[in-house]
Image (spheres, grey):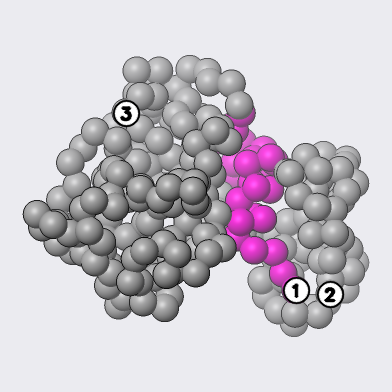
């Protein structure tokens, strides 16, 4: 089953230049975000307010950047992930990608990740600055259609879009992770770790497993290391593929 490097668009797809759609801005990320929203309005016929509501966002989140962008403002990876989930067919080259709330054949669960908005001391983990954790709500999970997956794979595999660049260049923001919930994680492999965090919902980390000891595991993002006691680890799954454009 071949999964690597399938042609599925990242969070920031490449669009052709649009001369008159919006003012010229200096920030490349802001330019790409404007182009993305312009493309969705053309493809769907929806207003920017309707696009925001369909993605579960406040209209002001998008009107601040389109059609006239505010200075030094662009869209967060959390916002882009929500837009991607709401309008997968509007992304160039992504016609084979479908996101829905009702499972169908060859679909697997899609976890929606977002940045954790609590300080590290409240996570009870001595993490260095720059080591990212994410929140995940299983109740809000959708399903993702993927090639080469049949219905019996649904219980074993899951998918998630990488929310940030903590693992770059190994894994970049917007790339889709394929998670094997049954394959044991080996040292040196990329893992999807769910933590036991009562009163904070589900907190997860995407990292490389450096060491798995009896009492703790050691995870790495770039040059940042964190040691987590085994009692805080709810489940650790292997990342078996990344789908990128």
In 3D space, how far apart are the residues under numbered discs 1 and 3 (Cα atoms)?
39 Å
| 196 over 139 or under it: above or below | below
Q: Which residue is mark 3?
A: 156
> Badges 2 and 3: C-beta atoms under 8 Å apart?
no
- Residue at point 48% right, 17% down? 105
Residue extending farthest left: 214
Label 3: state its secondary structure.
loop
- Residue at point 23% right, 51% down? 231
Q: Earlier in the sequence, mark 2 or mark 3?
A: 2
Left or right position of 18 against 181? right
Per the rendered image, the range of residues in magenta is 73-100
Q: Which residue is mark 1?
A: 73
> Label 1 neighbourhood size at 10 Å, few (<14), some (14-19), many (20+)?
few
Q: Earlier in the sequence, mark 1 or mark 3?
A: 1
Label 1: state its secondary structure.
loop
Q: Quadrant of the N terminus?
A: top left
Position of residue 22 measured from the top left corner of the image (x, y, whole percent) = 87, 67
Label 2: state its secondary structure.
loop
Q: Is residue 192 something one can see in this rendering? A: no
Position of residue 101 measured from the top left corner of the image (x, y, whole percent) = 61, 26
Position of residue 108 measured from the top left corner of the image (x, y, whole percent) = 44, 29
| 137 over 59 or under it: above or below | above
Left or right position of 132 against 3? right
Which mark is drawn over residue 70?
A: 2
Is residue 90 in the magenta section?
yes
- Residue at point 42% right, 70% down? 121
Left or right position of 208 against 70? left
In 3D space, how far apart are the residues under numbered discs 1 and 2 (Cα atoms)?
6 Å
Q: Which one is in front, 55 or 126? A: 126
> Badges 1 and 2: C-beta atoms under 8 Å apart?
yes
């Amino acid at each position: 089953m071949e999964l690597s490097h399938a042609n599925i668009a990242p969070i920031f797809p490449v669009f052709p230049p649009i001369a008159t759609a919006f003012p010229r801005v200096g920030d490349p990320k802001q330019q790409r975000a404007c182009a993305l929203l312009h493309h969705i309005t053309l493809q769907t016929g929806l207003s920017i307010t309707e696009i925001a509501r369909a993605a579960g966002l406040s209209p002001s989140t998008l009107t601040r950047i389109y059609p006239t962008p505010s200075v030094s403002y662009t869209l967060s990876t959390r916002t882009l992930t929500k837009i991607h989930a709401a309008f997968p067919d509007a992304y160039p080259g992504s016609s084979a990608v479908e996101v829905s709330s009702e499972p169908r054949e060859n679909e697997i669960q899609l976890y929606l990740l977002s940045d954790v908005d609590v300080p590290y001391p409240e996570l009870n983990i001595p993490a260095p600055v720059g080591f990212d954790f994410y929140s995940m709500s299983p109740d809000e999970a959708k399903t993702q259609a993927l090639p080469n997956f049949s219905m019996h794979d649904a219980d074993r595999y899951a998918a998630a879009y990488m929310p940030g660049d903590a693992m770059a260049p190994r894994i970049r923001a917007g790339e889709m992770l394929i998670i094997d919930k049954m394959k044991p994680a080996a040292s040196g492999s990329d893992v999807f770790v769910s933590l036991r965090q009562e009163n904070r919902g589900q907190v997860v980390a995407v990292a490389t497993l450096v060491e798995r000891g009896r009492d703790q595991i050691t995870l790495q993002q770039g040059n940042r290391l964190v040691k987590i006691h085994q009692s805080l680890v709810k489940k650790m799954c292997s990342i078996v593929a990344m789908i990128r454009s």
